Image (cartoon, rainbow, N blue to C red):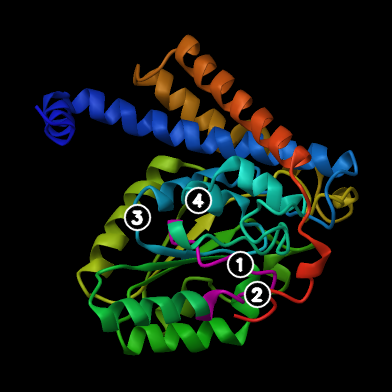
Amino acid sequence: MNSKLKTKNSKLSRSPVAIEREKWLRFYRQMLKIRLFEEQVNQLYLGAKMPGLAHLYIGEEAIAVGVCEALRGDDYITSTHRGHGHCLAKGAAVERMFAELLGKAPGYCRGKGGSMHIADQETGNLGANAIVAGSAGIATGAAMSAKMRGSNQIAVCFFGEGALGQGLLYEVMNMASLWKLPTLFVCENNQYNEYTHYQETTAGDLKARPEAFGIETVSIDGQDVGVVYTTALRLVGQIRQGKGPAFLICDTYRFHGHHVGDINRTYYRSKHEEEEWKSKRDPLVLLVARLKAQKLANDKALAKIEEELRREIEAGVEFALNAPYPDAAEVDQHVYA
């Protein structure tokens, strides 16, 4: 019996319970990988081993994982400056991610993009962008390309709620709606535009903005990976059927500051607020509780996954620290496409 037939028969023989368990453990593995990766990024920065800044995704892991698990491998994503989680959820390798952050040649952009400009064509990741709403046009353009080619791919654009103050987003939402482009706009509302609560900078109801363009808009709890996944799966299915774009608002919270050097965040948000989110709305804690309640995993199984991931993260860091920097002669290469 050939290997493909064996695999097919193996899938057919698994019970629905086994398939469900595998799915939820995959969610856990992916979310924990992002959490451990970001914790290590913070340590590299504090140890003066990483140039520039980084914007940590800790606290928001359920969104990247829930959405990307609803996609096909050849679907596109574009990311924002808090984008490590999106890259990893779409299939990026830990060692190459660390190499890029440390400015090393084996990184995804040969160490020239850094934390906020990681792209990987092979996984459909068209790139993170340090400009607020900067990747909205890229995602919509990719969606237009997919529609013209008849590839049945979709493009997902991740951005923070601060992007709702950028004109580019409204221009591309208008185009996407008019031409029924296969685009999913994902707004990660972590409550703060850098150092200001979004309610002080954004007037009116957030949902009303995309709805004004005739785009189906859904607002959900971004800390519940199950809710994110099922909602994204439904919207992605509609988009793939040619029903036009959709807009997903995920309420979430960044557990760290705006960036790794933001140590004075208590000036613009209270410790009580932070502790409320961390103690009651941590997406990983909520997921673990669900896994145990539904008897999908026990402490031993979860500890084994964590141990495997910690080894993967450690190996990735070691790889990046020992990797070479790009040759200085390359300074004027890859500047333009």
Residue with the mark numbered 4: 64
Q: Position of residue 282 (x, y in %)?
A: 59, 36
So how many labels did they put on this image? Answer: 4
Q: Separation of disc 2 and disc 4 at Cα?
A: 24 Å
Q: Are marks 2 and 1 in contact (CB under 8 Å)?
A: yes
Q: Main secondary structure of the magenta part?
A: loop
User: What are the residue bounds of the magenta stretch?
Assistant: 123-137
Q: Separation of disc 3 and disc 1 at Cα?
A: 22 Å
First along the sequence among labels 3 and 4 = 4
Q: Amino acid at mark 2?
A: Thr
Q: Residues within 10 Å of mark 4 (few under 14, many from 20)?
A: many
- What element does badge 1 sit on? helix
Q: Which residue corresponds to the image point at 36% horizontal and 55% vertical from the top-left?
A: 232
Residue with the mark numbered 3: 71
- What element does badge 4 sit on? helix
Residue with the mark numbered 2: 202
Q: Position of residue 47 (x, y in %)?
A: 89, 38
First along the sequence among labels 4 and 1 = 4
Residue with the mark numbered 1: 161
Quadrant for the N terminus in the image: top left
